[in-house]
Structure formats: C-alpha cells, structure tokens
Amino acid sequence: QQTACIFDLDGVLVDTAVYHYKAWKQLANSLGFDFTHAQNEQLKGVSRMRSLDMILEWGGIRKSDAEREELASLKNSWYVAMISKMTAGEVLPGSLELLRQLKQQGIKIALGSASKNSALILERTGLAHFFDAIVDGNAVTTSKPDPEVFIKAAELLDTAAAGCVVFEDAFAGVQAANAAGMGVVGIGDAENLKGAQIVIKDLSEITVAEIEALNRFLK
Ligand code: G6P
Ligand code: MG
C-alpha cells in the first residue's frame, strides 16, 4: 500500500506561527489583557473563531456575535498584512528538501491546514506547486482535533488513511491525525505533542525512508 504525506502549514512548512501570535497578542492587548506562551500553544491548529473564543474567555470578556466577527476580521487584517510580505526565506529548515525528495520518489503530497489564508502563504513562499491536493480552512466544517481535514486530504490523494503520514506542530493536529488512523510526525517539543510517533525539531531531521516506515500497513 502506497504512502502519502499530509502537511500542516503554519509552524510545519512555514514560520507563520509567530505572526498568528503577534496578531492575537495585539488584539488581546487592545482589549486590555495578555496571555501566556503556554496559552498560545493551545491556539496552534485551532480555527480563527475558536481561537478568538478561547482568548476572550482568558480575558474574561463577553462579546456579541457581531462583535466577535469584527474582532476576528481585525486580527486577520493584521495577520494578512504580515503574511503578504512573506518570502521564500520564511520556509522552515528542511521543508523544501523534503518536499523535493518526496516528489522525486513519486509520493503524493497534500496540505491539511485549518487556515483560510493558505493560498496566499503558499503563493508568497513558492511552495504551491508541490501539492497534489489542498485542504484548508475553506474546505472543512470542523476544526482539529476533529479528523475531517486529514480524511478529506487522504480522499483527494486516493490513499487509505493507514498509508498517510501527517506532519503537525499542534497537539490538536496530532489528536486529529490519530483520530483519522494515520501516522503522525510531531514538529516541535515532545512534551506538547503527546501521541506523535516521532517528534523532531524540523523537517531536516527526517528522511523519506523513515517516513515510509510510519505507513501503518507495514505495522
Ligand atoms: C492554523 C494555525 C492557527 C490558526 C488557524 C486558522 O491552524 O495554527 O493558529 O488560527 O490556522 O488560520 P487563519 O489563517 O484562517 O486565521
Ligand atoms: Mg500548525
């Protein structure tokens, strides 16, 4: 059974996590409070509206639906201003090399991201051409840890879930990959990524052979 790779975007292929953090922090500060790095960790992989709701709760602030929509678009406008200036230099270490090798070996590649801004980011960083399928926040109705985003990606790649290996920097994403019955490589700190089969610092630390060994048909 063939292996396919599904990559999260923010914090795995590109260094956008820092921009999300800056924009959310600016929003919280404008409302008169702040949140910690540990709290920020919980926002990774979480949709825009769900992130806003978590932040408002941390600040003990209640807002109407209309105000919530406004705050979310304000944050997004700051975020989009930052990512509009991104360059290929913000692709994380090892991403390009690994994507090239996967392509060379005929392994299919999908994006599985909660972001509604994925097209802009992939275009700015020159990564778009690597993907056989793109599933992002515009294509799903439920957020990670629900497995919908990865299940859709596997369907588009015409690959069984057990043959898919997911790359994730968010705990919610690791949970989603496990719920989908896929292999999962965690990117970042092992203590934040319980449930991942391997945890690496970045994509320069893994080979195609090691990825193929995570294909669950081989277990
Ligand atoms: C990714 C990021 C989250 C972000 C979400 C939605 O999962 O890790 O921090 O909230 O995408 O991104 P968007 O670009 O649609 O606001
Ligand atoms: Mg991520």
Image (spheres, rainbow, N blue to C red):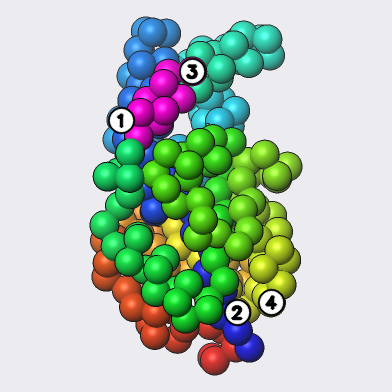
Contact between labelled residues 4 and 2, with CB atoms less than 8 Å apart:
yes
| Mark-to-mark CA distance, 1 and 4 | 39 Å
Mark 3 vs ligand 1: CB below 8 Å: no
Using the numbered discs, state the Cα–Cα distance from disc 1 to disc 3 in whole angstroms.
23 Å
State which region is magenta: 77-86
- Compared to residue 47, the image places residue 219 above or below, namely below
Instruction: Classify mark 2: helix, strand or loop.
Output: helix
Residue 27 visible in rendering: yes
Q: Does residue 123 appear left or right of residue 63 in this picture?
A: left
* Label 1 SS: loop
- Farthest bottom residue in view: 218
Label 1 vs label 2, nearer the camera: 2
Q: Of residues 107 and 176, which is closer to you in this image?
A: 107
Q: Nearer the viewer, mark 1 or mark 3?
A: 3
Mark 3 or mark 4: name the one nearer the start of the chain: 3
Residue 126 placement (x, y as % from top left) = 42, 48
User: Tag 4: Cα neighbours inside 10 Å, few (<14), some, or many (≥20)?
Assistant: some
Q: Is label 4 within 8 A of ligand 2 (CB to nearest ligand atom)?
A: no
Q: Earlier in the sequence, mark 1 or mark 2?
A: 1
Q: Which residue is mark 4?
A: 160
172 falls in the magenta region: no
Q: Main secondary structure of the magenta part?
A: helix
Residue at the spot of label 1: 36
Q: Whole-percent x and y of residue 139? A: 70, 44
Respond yes or no on whether mark 1 lies under 8 Å from ligand 1. no
Instruction: Work out how far the residue at label 2 is from the one at label 4, CA to CA, in angstroms.
Output: 5 Å
Between 91 and 169, the residue placed more toward the observer is 91
Mark 2, residue position: 163
Which amino acid, by three-letter code, is at mark 4?
Ala
Q: In this rendering, would 136 be left or right of 9?
A: right
